Amino acid sequence: MEKIVFEDIALDYRESNGTVFNALDGVSFTVNEGEFVSIIGSSGCGKSTILSVLAGLNEPKSGSYRIDGAETRGTGKNRGVVFQHYSLFPWMTIRKNIEFGIKQNFPKQSKKELAEKADLYLKKVGLKGFENRYPSQLSGGMQQRAAIARTLAMETDILLMDEPFGAIDAKNRIILQDLLLDILDTADVKKTIIFVTHDVDEAILMSDRILFMKNKKIEKDINVPFPRPRKRNELLERSGFRQFRQRIVNLFYFDEDEKQDFQEGEGI
């Protein structure tokens, strides 16, 4: 069943000097209910702009998008967003941050119900015992766990994640990837997720499909052939993993000069 349909979306930004910058140029794709779809591509290709449109933070110049069959504009309580930077309120404890998110979707819940639900999701992300700390008292990885807990606790159908692990060190990135996979794979109801990342291995590990962007459009729509649930070490040993990974990496090689730049450490 189609959950999200993007149809020929175009969007321009006007820079401070008056120059108009084309951010999206006729973007079209469909995401089915319960799918985990990653968007990858070179910096500046428009990945995060797609999420900003879906979150209702930017209005497209032309085209339309539908959620559950209804044309959509603006923000909505059916979409939760996790940004690269933790976006926690520094004056609130971790529990209060999560309760604030819950209240947006469940305004009639009592204080007791809010606290119980907040504690449930704190436990899910491994932050039990830290509920009365403030964001400044936690590491970056722990703050991002709290941000994920807040969004999950809102219990939205759709989860939009914009490089949520991009500002975290390698060790905590692996921990959070595995944590999110475990939470999502064991959930009673699967969320529909659009996940922006620069990391090819992350995209393969997490996704059902990968959308590759080039020239402000979706250039490739690729099914990830490995069954769920996935375990990192098992996936690396699967027959065909290396060939599939190389297929994805090769999408970034536009010509020999760019290939050389990539090999010298520009990366994804």
Image (cartoon, rainbow, N blue to C red):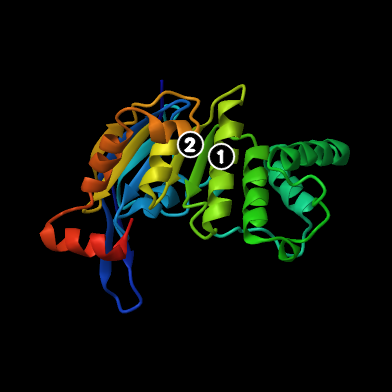
Residue depicted at x 59% and y 32%: 182
Mark 1 Cα-neighbour bin, 10 Å: few <14, some 14–19, many ≥20 = some
Relative to 140, say whether 184 is above or below: above
Mark 2 Cα-neighbour bin, 10 Å: few <14, some 14–19, many ≥20 = some
Quarter occupied by the C terminus: bottom left
Callout 1 amino acid: Asp
Relative to 90, say whether 128 is above or below: above
Residue depicted at x 48% and y 56%: 166
State the image coordinates of residue 258 (x, y, percent, origin top left): 18, 61
Relative to 205, say whether 176 is above or below: below
Work out whether residue 16 or residue 266 is closer to the camera in this orientation and state it.
Answer: 266
The label nearer to you, 1 versus 2, is: 2
State the image coordinates of residue 115 (x, y, percent, origin top left): 83, 41
State the image coordinates of residue 217 (x, y, percent, origin top left): 24, 47
Query: Quadrant of residue 8 in the image?
Result: top left
- Judged from this view, the residue extending furthest toward the front is 237
Residue depicted at x 67% and y 54%: 142
Circle 2 residue: 232
Is tag 1's residue or tag 2's residue first in the polypeptide sequence?
A: 1
Quarter occupied by the N terminus: top left
Asked if labels 2 and 1 touch by Cβ distance under 8 angstroms, the answer is: yes
Q: Which numbered tag is attached to residue 178?
A: 1
Q: In this view, does 172 lie to the left or right of 38?
A: right
Q: In this view, does 58 lie to the left or right of 15?
A: right
